[in-house]
Image (spheres, rainbow, N blue to C red):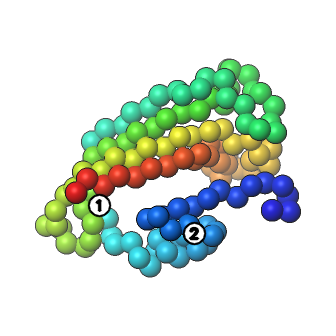
Amino acid sequence: MPDGKALPTIVYNGNVILDAVSFQNTFEKQMPATHFEVQAYDCHVINPNYTAVGSERSSGVSGKNMTILVIVSGYIRLGESRDGAMRGFSETFVLVPNPDPANAKGPKHLRKDWLIQSQNFRLVI
């Protein structure tokens, strides 16, 4: 990119999707309606001393110098039918602090303090 930032690679069902707009279009047009019943959340600090490339290390007081593993599990129903089968799912996220200084500007509710470094969704069949 012109600003020197690397774009993330989006892979969906084994297919590389070129940009976020294409992914949003794919998601809106191809995904069925869903209903989730979350049974458990689990969260662990992976690295308590994380420093993003090109950023300054923040103080430990802010809680912004770590990577966090978040695991969510439960049941999902795909499709509109209320009596459709519920299937188990597991989703894992690795969250990292957002190093972009522009993120500190603007209303707090619009800030992206954390970014998804990795995401993995598994459907139990």
16 on left or right of 7: left
Q: Position of residue 64 (x, y in %)?
A: 66, 31
Q: Amino acid at mark 2?
A: Ile
52 on left or right of 86: right
Residue that appears at 44% across and 79% down? 29
Query: Is residue 26 placed above or below 53 in the rendered structure?
Result: below
Mark 2: give few (<14), some (14-19) or many (20+) Cα within 10 Å. some
Among numbered discs 2 and 1, the one appearing first in the sequence: 2
Q: Position of residue 61 (x, y in %)?
A: 68, 20
**Quarter of the figure with residue 17:** bottom right
Query: Is residue 102 placed above or below 57 in the rendered structure?
Result: below
Q: Which mark is residue 44?
A: none
Query: Is residue 68 placed above or below 92 in the rendered structure?
Result: above
Mark 1 residue element: strand
| Quarter of the image where the N terminus is located | bottom right
Q: Amino acid at mark 1?
A: His
Q: CA distance from mark 2 to mark 1?
A: 25 Å
Q: Position of residue 97 (x, y in %)?
A: 66, 38
| Quarter of the image where the C terminus is located | bottom left
Mark 2 residue element: strand
23 on left or right of 107: left
Residue that appears at 61% across and 23% down? 48
Q: Is residue 37 visible?
A: no
The residue identified by callout 2 is 17
Residue that appears at 31% across and 65% down? 34
Question: Foreground: 120 or 98?
Answer: 120
Q: Which mark is residue 35?
A: 1
**Quarter of the figure with residue 20:** bottom right
